[in-house]
Amino acid sequence: MLRRYSGGTPVPGLCPARAHVALVVLIATLATSIYTPAAQAQKPTLPITVLPLRISSVNVQNGQLVANGTLGHTSFTAPITLSATPSADPK
């Protein structure tokens, strides 16, 4: 069957029903590939923030070791505790 569109040349083998079905299948395929639940369920990754940690000194205060440092722009002091345990193999 030969058809003419807007006065143009005949298009051999073009069946409007088949073209319509092909277009519907194409749109359905694209729609399901774009709007899959797995793609919508993905959570965006959050940026990781890293602050610089700097230990500037270790001092003895009231008989205990104390570390002085900064985390980002915040100064802090933290007690340092040390312990020792004997090894299981005494050589």
Image (spheres, rainbow, N blue to C red):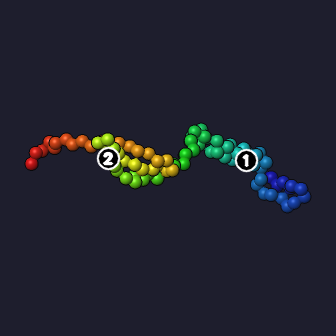
Report whether 14 appears left or right of 39: right
Q: How many marks?
A: 2
Q: Is residue 37 above or below residue 13?
A: above
Q: Residue at x 77, y 49 (%)?
A: 15
Mark 1: secondary structure = helix
The location of residue 89, given as percent across then percent down, is 12, 44
Instruction: Return the x and y of residue 54 as percentages of the image width and height.
Output: 42, 53
Identify which amino acid the numbered label 2 is placed on.
Val
Give x and y (percent) for residue 18.
74, 47
Q: Is residue 8 depicted above or below 51 in this figure?
A: below
Dot 1 and dot 2 residues touching (CB under 8 Å):
no
In the picture, measured across the screen, residue 62 lies left or right of residue 40, that is left
Looking at this view, is 39 or 5 the one in front? 39
Query: Dot 2, how many residues are within 10 Å of its Cα: few (below 14), some (14-19), or many (20+)?
Result: few
The front one of 22 and 70 is 70
Whichever of callouts 1 and 2 sits on the residue coming sooner in the sequence is 1
Q: Is residue 68 left or right of residue 32?
A: left
User: Mark 1 — residue?
Assistant: 23
Give the distance between the C-alpha atoms of the residues marked 1 and 2, in whole angstroms.
80 Å
Disc 1 crowd rating (10 Å Cα; few below 14, some 14-19, many 20+) is few
Nearest the eye: 62 or 14: 62
Tag 2's secondary structure? Answer: strand
Residue 79 shows in this picture: yes
Label placed on residue 42: none
Q: Quadrant of residue 63?
A: top left
Q: Residue at position x 84%, y 54% from top?
A: 3
Can you identify the residue that label 2 sits on? Answer: 60
Closer to viewer: mark 1 or mark 2: 2
Place residue 43 in its image quadrant: top right
| Amino acid type indicated by mark 1 | Leu
**Residue at point 77%, 53% (across, down):** 14
Up/down of 8 relative to 76, above or below? below
